[in-house]
Image (spheres, rainbow, N blue to C red):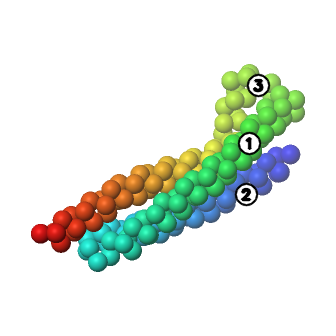
Amino acid sequence: MAEEKKYNDDQAKEKLEMIEQKLAAERKDWKEKIHDLIKMIRGTSTLAEAQVFMLSYRQLFVEKITELRGLLMKKQKSIDTFYKDQYREYTINYDIKLSPAEKNQFIKADLANLRMQAELLENQINFFQESVKTMDTMSFSINNRIKLAEAQLDQ
């Protein structure tokens, strides 16, 4: 049983590293796209195009949030199942009798990589939620730039 646990822990560590890299690359990509979009707002000739991109990006963020919430729910289910299995393992099959607090500490250590994966997903969800807020703010900015340009044409 100890060999199987070690294998799963190693697998969880590898998955954690993969998730970290993927999410970091995704954040970097979106950061660049948002910066490019902000540059487009500077000129009145690109405002219409910026508005289209802003709406498109906002929708993509909402879809990513939904997708990541689904993954987070699955990850939480895995954590809960693993917790139950480990509690039973430490209660029935462990060589030393452990108190409930000791069992919880052991399981907490066993779950560290899975919990970190869940925290990374939560962090990414927060990133996309803040990006939606940025798009909303940008929408107001684009509308104000359009009104300002119209006012200048009227004069």
**Disc nearest the viewer among 2 and 3:** 2
Image coordinates of residue 51 in percent, x first then y, are 39, 67
Task: Tell me which numbered mark, 2 or 3, is placed earlier along the sequence.
Answer: 2
- Residue receiving disc 3: 98
Q: Local crowd at mark 1 within 10 Å, few (<14), some, or many (≥20)?
A: few
Image coordinates of residue 94 in percent, x first then y, are 83, 33
What is the three-letter code of the residue carrying label 2? Gln
Task: Tell me which numbered mark, 1 or 3, is placed earlier along the sequence.
Answer: 1
The answer to whether any part of residue 36 appears in the image is no
- The residue furthest bottom is 45
Task: Name the residue located 22 percent from the left edge and 67 percent from the top edge.
Answer: 150
Image coordinates of residue 104 in percent, x first then y, are 69, 29
Q: Local crowd at mark 2 within 10 Å, few (<14), some, or many (≥20)?
A: few
**Disc nearest the viewer among 2 and 1:** 1
Q: In terms of secondary structure, where does tag 1 sit?
A: helix
Q: Is residue 138 left or right of residue 101?
A: left
- Residue receiving disc 1: 77
Q: In terms of secondary structure, where does tag 3 sit?
A: loop
The answer to whether any part of residue 55 appears in the image is yes
Quadrant in the picture for the N terminus: top right
- Using the image, determine if residue 51 lies above or below residue 6: below
Task: Name the residue located 76 percent from the left edge and 52 percent from the top edge.
Answer: 8
Say if mark 2 contacts mark 1, CB within 8 Å. Answer: no
Answer with the quarter of the image where residue 7 lies.
Answer: bottom right
What is the three-letter code of the residue carrying label 1? Lys
Q: Nearer the viewer, residue 72 or 22?
A: 72
- Residue receiving disc 2: 11
How many angstroms separate mark 1 from mark 3 (CA)?
25 Å
**Disc nearest the viewer among 1 and 3:** 1
Task: Tell me which numbered mark, 2 or 1, is placed earlier along the sequence.
Answer: 2
What is the three-letter code of the residue carrying label 3? Leu
